[in-house]
Image (tube, rainbow, N blue to C red):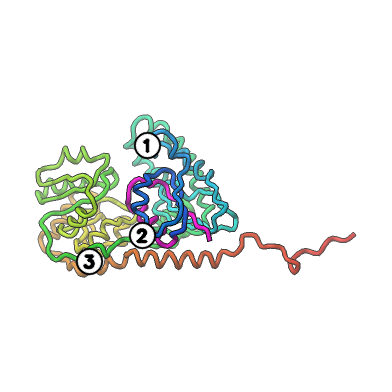
């Protein structure tokens, strides 16, 4: 059986790339197809058993593609349709940017693991547009209209959908009118131990982009006066640095060993954005740290209020401050061992078991797309 794995772009290792790496562990002979990638980054993330090839679409050959790949978004549907996948029996697409719109053989099985329908053309379209520059605000309404039509139609090319959370499954049903099995993303929970000794600082970890709302964390801790460490890089880093008081430390991007150490020592993780799933909260709980999260989106599926963290109801500074004060006052306490045990239910081993079972069922239930005409079923020849 020949297997192809399709991913949108792979220039750093985040949640979507962790899923692809785990898929390759299951199918080490699979060939990878990516719009644009840093091959060194990809190969370091893949298991040593990988024997397939790494292929890119024509997007990777366009000027400045590795830095400005998002500007080539209008060309990505065409790039996907130019991929010749006629030799492949099983296609696994990893969808968040355009990835699922490939053209396959009629008898091939195409399973899409959907991290999210493209947020910037669906539910977060107006938020994205309001923060864009003048040129993007002028052109993107025309581009996004065409992308929505293509995105909806290309969903019909998928045989079966997997969603990374119930939250995403609802959006798949809303935008694509398709049902999806929920299989949570893989988290390496065994990398962490539930440290009983906690520090006095809180941690905010992730990409510093507007919708993740790290600004809420900085503004809340400016008022609280408690120590906050912010790890990550992105478009709002300079803004956060300008407003942060001395008790708030911005560290920028950090290597995994440093992140692991911070997660195992922090008093708690601050998670103020609305995520599709959110791997970082699960890693924090695996390290014995409670999670103070905005109570919407994927956090509702990973954080148990009062047991593994606090869910604050409104995405405001005041609501976040009240949640932190519950922890500081001792009104709510957390057991690191309980946190770790809960996180273990999202471990990569469980992801791999469920994906393997899902693929096996899909392959067994697919059958040939076109039934051959046999002597027993053929229509009798017409006679004069």
Magenta region includes residue 312: no
Residue for point 78% across, 63% down: 379
Across and down, in percent, residue 19 comes to: 38, 57
Across and down, in percent, residue 4 comes to: 49, 54
Q: Is residue 247 left or right of residue 373?
A: left
Q: Quadrant of residue 70?
A: top left
Q: Is residue 170 above or below residue 99?
A: below
Q: Secondary structure at mark 3?
A: helix
- Comparing labels 2 and 1, the label whose residue is closer to the camera: 1
What residue is shown with label 1?
68
Asked if the residue at tag 1 contacts the one at tag 2, i.e. Cβ–Cβ closer than 8 Å, the answer is no
The crowding category of the residue bearing disc 3, from other C-alpha atoms within 10 Å (few below 14, some 14 to 19, many at least 20), is many
Residue for point 17% across, 55% down: 262
Q: Quadrant of residue 298?
A: bottom left
Span of residues in magenta: 1-27
What residue is shown with label 3?
339
Asked if the residue at tag 2 contacts the one at tag 3, i.e. Cβ–Cβ closer than 8 Å, the answer is no
Q: Secondary structure at mark 1?
A: helix
What residue is shown with label 2?
185
Picture quarter with the C terminus: bottom right
The crowding category of the residue bearing disc 2, from other C-alpha atoms within 10 Å (few below 14, some 14 to 19, many at least 20), is many
Q: Is residue 179 above or below residue 247?
A: below
Magenta region includes residue 6: yes
Disc 3/disc 2 C-alpha distance (Å) = 18 Å
Across and down, in percent, residue 340 comes to: 23, 67
């Amino acid at each position: 059986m020949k297997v192809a794995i399709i991913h949108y772009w792979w220039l750093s290792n985040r949640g979507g790339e962790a899923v692809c790496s785990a898929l390759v562990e299951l199918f080490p002979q699979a060939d990878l197809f990516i719009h644009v990638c840093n091959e060194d980054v990809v190969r370091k993330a893949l298991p040593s058993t990988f024997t397939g090839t790494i292929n890119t679409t024509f997007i990777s050959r366009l000027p400045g593609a590795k830095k400005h790949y998002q500007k080539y978004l209008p060309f990505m549907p065409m790039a996907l349709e130019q991929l010749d996948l006629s030799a492949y029996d099983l296609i696994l697409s990893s969808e968040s940017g355009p990835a699922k719109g490939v053209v396959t053989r009629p008898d091939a099985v195409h399973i899409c693991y959907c991290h999210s329908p493209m947020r910037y053309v669906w539910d977060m379209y107006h938020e994205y547009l309001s923060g864009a520059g003048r040129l993007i605000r002028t052109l993107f309404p025309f581009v996004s209209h065409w992308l929505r039509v293509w995105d909806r139609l290309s969903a019909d090319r998928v045989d079966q959908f997997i969603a990374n959370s119930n939250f995403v499954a609802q959006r798949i049903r809303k935008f694509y009118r398709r049902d999806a099995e929920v299989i949570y993303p893989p988290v390496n929970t065994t990398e962490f131990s539930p440290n009983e000794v906690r520090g006095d600082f809180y941690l905010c970890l992730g990409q510093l982009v507007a919708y993740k709302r790290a600004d809420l964390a900085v503004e809340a801790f400016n008022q609280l006066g408690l120590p906050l460490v912010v790890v990550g890089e992105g478009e709002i880093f300079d803004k956060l640095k300008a407003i942060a008081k001395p008790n708030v430390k911005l560290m920028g991007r950090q290597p995994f060993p440093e992140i692991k150490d911070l997660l195992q020592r922090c008093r708690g993780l601050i998670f103020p954005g609305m995520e599709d799933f959110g791997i970082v909260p699960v890693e924090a709980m695996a390290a014995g740290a409670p999670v103070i999260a905005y109570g919407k989106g994927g956090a509702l599926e990973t954080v148990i209020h009062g047991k593994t963290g606090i869910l604050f109801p409104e995405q405001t500074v005041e609501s976040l401050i009240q949640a932190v004060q519950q922890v500081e006052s001792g009104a709510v306490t957390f057991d690191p061992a309980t946190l770790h045990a809960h996180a273990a239910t999202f471990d990569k081993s469980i992801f791999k078991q469920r994906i393997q079972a899902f693929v096996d069922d899909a392959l067994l239930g697919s059958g040939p797309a076109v039934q051959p005409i046999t002597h027993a079923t053929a229509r009798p020849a017409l006679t004069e």
